[in-house]
Image (cartoon, helix red, strand yellow):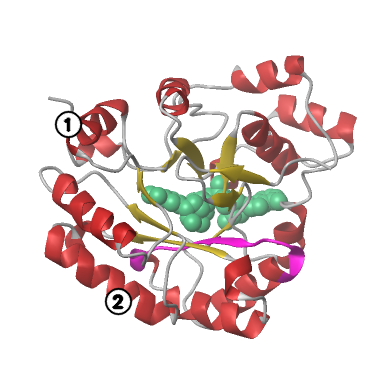
Amino acid sequence: NQQTRLKLLNGVDMPIIGFGVYKVEAGTETVNSVKTAIEAGYRSIDTAAIYQNESGVGQAIRESKVPREELFITSKVWNDDQGYDFTLRAFDESLRKLGLDYLDLYLIHWPVAGMYADTWRAMERLYKEGRVRAIGVSNFHVHHLENLLNQAKEVPVINQIELHPRLNQAEIRSFCHSHNIAVEAWAPLGKGKLLDEPVLAEIADSHNKTAAQVILRWHLQNGVIVIPKSVNPARIRENIKVFDFSLSPEEMQQIEELNSNERFGTNPDKYEPKP
Ligand code: NAD
């Protein structure tokens, strides 16, 4: 019986495993995979305006019949919608598409230069108005966080970043954890591209688990929230079966050593370079 939720710094409880829907096709594919995920036990769904599948996520939520308050729904404000007024409008639009009257978590998708501080003020307003239970950021380096913390009234509860064994983000993880900011891994499985690492296969075999489950377990034991994506029902179910084993300190260390600072996504400094 291992812990499946984490308390964010404002007291809100969040599932440590969620279902990511980036590149899941709008419509049937989104509706079916989100419903499969909810049936498999996921209670947290990670979408974004730019994924263009918020309507499908909303439909799946309604069809799942799981009470709204048992679910944890995240969306994100896209780069073109940053700034105070645009963010307020983008939030309304996301809620409308999802068919919800509040979000659990709203994130700034990327640290767009000169914009994210104004975006954050709008997020603080949405939070104060009770329209979202928690607000956070995504793709923030330490320098972005320091800059935001200097001006913000509310501390972001989460930083969602690219994080997997090849990009272990030790510095950002340690900064966030020392500020009680939760760390959430996107591409937790390295987009599925590092599952044939021999070390992972070896560890997986010894626990009768898959490489994907071993990677997810590594994140969780590091105190990191994960949102693996799949449209394959068997894999969707596989990815949440990570609460019946644990990795030894030696195995954790072996996985840590796979780091090569390799990114599959954009470096956030593209949007605002370090001054
Ligand atoms: P991921 O690491 O979750 O990898 C997904 C891919 O891995 C799948 O498409 C599939 O090919 C493979 N896979 C999944 N489960 C598997 C299994 N059990 N066995 C074998 N292969 C498996 O990558 P992702 O989708 O990019 O990231 C997860 C989520 O993070 C996204 O869906 C999205 O919600 C979020 N995300 C956020 C940002 C951001 O900028 N904030 C960027 C990218 C993704």
Q: Is residue 97 magenta?
A: no
Q: Are marks 1 and 2 in contact (CB under 8 Å)?
A: no
Q: Residues within 10 Å of mark 2 (few under 14, many from 20)?
A: some
* Closer to viewer: mark 1 or mark 2: 2
Side of 258 where 155 appears, left or right: left
> Which secondary structure lies at badge 2?
helix
Q: Give the CA separation, mark 1 to mark 2.
A: 30 Å
Q: Is residue 227 visible?
A: no
Q: Nearer the viewer, residue 167 or 49?
A: 49
Q: Quadrant of residue 2?
A: top right
Please provide the residue range marked out in magenta: 39-50
Give whichever of discs 1 and 2 has the lower sequence position: 2
How many neighbours does mark 1 have within 10 angstroms: few (below 14), some (14-19), or many (20 or more)?
some
Q: Is residue 198 left or right of residue 98?
A: right
Which residue was labeled with disc 2?
Answer: 93
| Amino acid beneath label 2 | Glu
Q: Quadrant of residue 258?
A: top right
Q: Does ligand 1 reach within 8 Å of label 2's beta carbon?
A: no
| Residue 61 point in image, percent of width and height | 58, 77
Disc 1 Cβ-to-ligand 1 distance below 8 Å:
no
Q: Quadrant of the C terminus?
A: top left
Q: Position of residue 184 (x, y in %)?
A: 50, 42
- Residue 200 percent across, percent down from the top left: 73, 30
Q: Looking at the image, which is closer to me, 213 or 17?
A: 17
The answer to whether any part of residue 150 appears in the image is yes
Disc 1 marks which amino acid?
Answer: Pro
Question: Residue 169, relative to residue 10: is it above or below?
Answer: above
Provide residue 121's location: percent of width, then percent of height. 19, 52
Task: Kindly identify which residue carries mark 1.
Answer: 273
Name the one closer to the observer, 102 or 42: 102
Image quadrant where residue 147 sits: top left
